[in-house]
Amino acid sequence: MAAAPRAPDNDNCHHGFDEGAADELDCLRGVLAPRLLQQAEIRARELGIGADQVLIRLGMIDEAAYLRLLSRHTGMAIDDLSECDRSDVMLRDDQITYAAASGLVPLHRDGERIMVIAPRNYSARAICRAKRSINIDFRLTSDYALRRFLLQEAAAPLIEESTRGLGLHDPAMSAAPAFAAARPWRGRFKRGAAVFAIATLPPFLFPAIWGAMLAVWFLAFTALRLATCAFLRQRHAAAPVLDDQLPNYSVIVALYREASSVAPLVLALEALDYPREKLDIILVVEPDDLQTRAAIARLGTKPHLRMLVAPAVAPQTKPKALNWALPFARGSFTAVYDAEDRPEPGQLRAALKAFRAHGREVACAQASLCIDNETHSLLSRMFTVEYAGHFDVMLPGMTAMGLPLPLGGSSNHFRTAMLRTVGAWDAYNVTEDADLGFRLARFGYRSVAFPSTTFEEAPLHLDAWLRQRSRWMKGWLQTWCVHMCHPVRLWREAGGRAFFTLNIVAGGNVVTALAYPIMLYAVIDHMVFSRSERSIDWATALHVAAFAAGCISTVALGGLGMMRRRRLRDGWILGLTPLYWICLSTAAWRAVWQFIWKPYHWEKTEHGLATRRTTDPAPRLSARRSQRQPHR
């Protein structure tokens, strides 16, 4: 397998380098109060990072001001990289992402070799201790200057990596178009011909066999869902992670037309029970979304929060925005959230506990998603029950069974190095999360569900729900086509469990929705229009069994999920399951049409329309954080 290049560790220096005094504070003696420096050193020892990072990330001193003082103290020059261009960088295009991740840029300028470093973690301490023995010409730069330089002078390889990186490393793993944009009709013709051949010829030539295959597929899908109900959510014992052992944690959120969601989102992320000095929040916006950019600017300067503007190139999708941010992620772990998310305060620590409990081969930990709308429509109520069954029952059950997980699009927690290894997200897949779950399995990695909740907002109206669900169905279809394009290779790389899980879950989600009208017609025809003396044939019996099993599995999964959420009083909505499936089938057929004509079109889901429960975790954490942070 042609794996994507593996990125180095995110920090300039080793995490364990914490011996002795905080020499990086020497340049601040006489500038900041001695008590503040003492508190910063104590806090740095507690967290296992440099004391300079404590002061900078808490806003006690500006990074540029600290670099000026460090430069004067060490004699090391500051280089803002304004006089450099791409030809000065001693890195190939495929190595540019390493510079963004590590904060190190090797230059060759005026016949000299220069190493420019944006200090992170213990870098400043190492520089102070080695200032008299460094032979190479080291220069200091700020993180902002480094990022500006890379985005200006090395934008082309970063754009290529964010849009077609996966396709370049392994084309068979990506849903990217195989034909040039100037000839889109060829791709449409191929997709249309494939859909026509699969959906029309077998039913016409072998109607009974085709109908039986659909019913069996439906039964297999419902059987897997019922099987997951037998597993209780496992509580793995793992030692709590102490503050000095906590890694840097990046949080990436892709935003588009979410100006009203920015302030509540940042408030929720800042309420996470995680040291602010080790939290790295990246908000990615689109170039034409001026309102969201203005909303972020109104938040003011926050050392732990950065905004990146995604490039104005196709496709304009969430996975492309996530790929654009990933090279700049400083964390050893990376979490992905959506604009409307409200994660529980302890989620990052709970994710780390799950990684420790399940072993080093786990690349992703998936938290549960829960709908918290208070202004419910019938659709949003059904959405709530559906999420409870999927995230609180099915995914934990699949984890216990050792199956690959169809990841949700939010509250995914990754080992950053492993995420980079597998090629990150497919910018052309509109359900990049589900695709990534199966791709991780093909690389030998595991995904697990863990008990922590992120609260989300469900669509209230049919048109919004239909757009969102059609995109999901289209993405499932893309994912199935990509991984089943070479079934023998899939079996060899991922094994039989992953092979059948892909076909039952990814294929089953679409096929069952498409086939539902056929089975519903067979059931109604037998129960209403058939004569009483007419004996039931085997095909009709199979359709009736599939319909009944589907209803039973949906009620069992949703009811058990709502019971675990202690909201069983809302379970009455499951009585509308047959009608809800008609909506799902409509979305699936709409997705097939879009798969042919607009395969990479991302239909935006509007947020901020519903009244939600007011759960502000910040006050509970304020006292604890005030004890941890250094005081003036």
Image: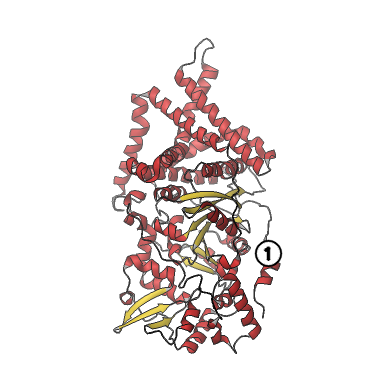
Which residue of the protein is positioned furthest toward the top in this rendering?
533
Residue 315 left/right relative to 222: left
- The x and y percentages for residue 590 are 45, 40
How many numbered marks, from 0 up?
A: 1
Residue 395 left/right relative to 179: right
Residue 140 left/right relative to 391: left
Give the camera-side residue of 395 and 202: 395
The quadrant of the picture occupied by the C terminus is bottom right
Q: Is residue 203 above or below residue 43?
A: above
Q: Quadrant of residue 130?
A: bottom left
Task: Look at mark 1 in the image and give the residue it sits on.
Answer: 621
Q: Amino acid at mark 1?
A: Leu
- The x and y percentages for residue 120 are 49, 74
- The x and y percentages for residue 54 are 58, 75
Q: Is residue 290 above or below residue 212?
A: below
- The x and y percentages for residue 563 are 66, 40
Residue drawn at point x = 55 percent, y = 79 percent: 20
Which residue of the protein is positioned furthest toward the front in this rendering?
19
Give the camera-side residue of 121 and 594: 121
Residue drawn at point x = 52 percent, y = 56 percent: 413
How busy is the neighbourhood of tag 1: few (under 14 within 10 Å), some, or many (20 plus)? Answer: some
Q: Is residue 65 above or below residue 297?
A: below
Q: Is residue 71 above or below residue 614?
A: below
Q: Is residue 456 visible?
A: no
Dot 1 falls on a residue whose secondary structure is: helix
Render colour scheme: secondary structure
Q: Is residue 78 visible?
A: yes
Q: Quadrant of residue 47?
A: bottom right
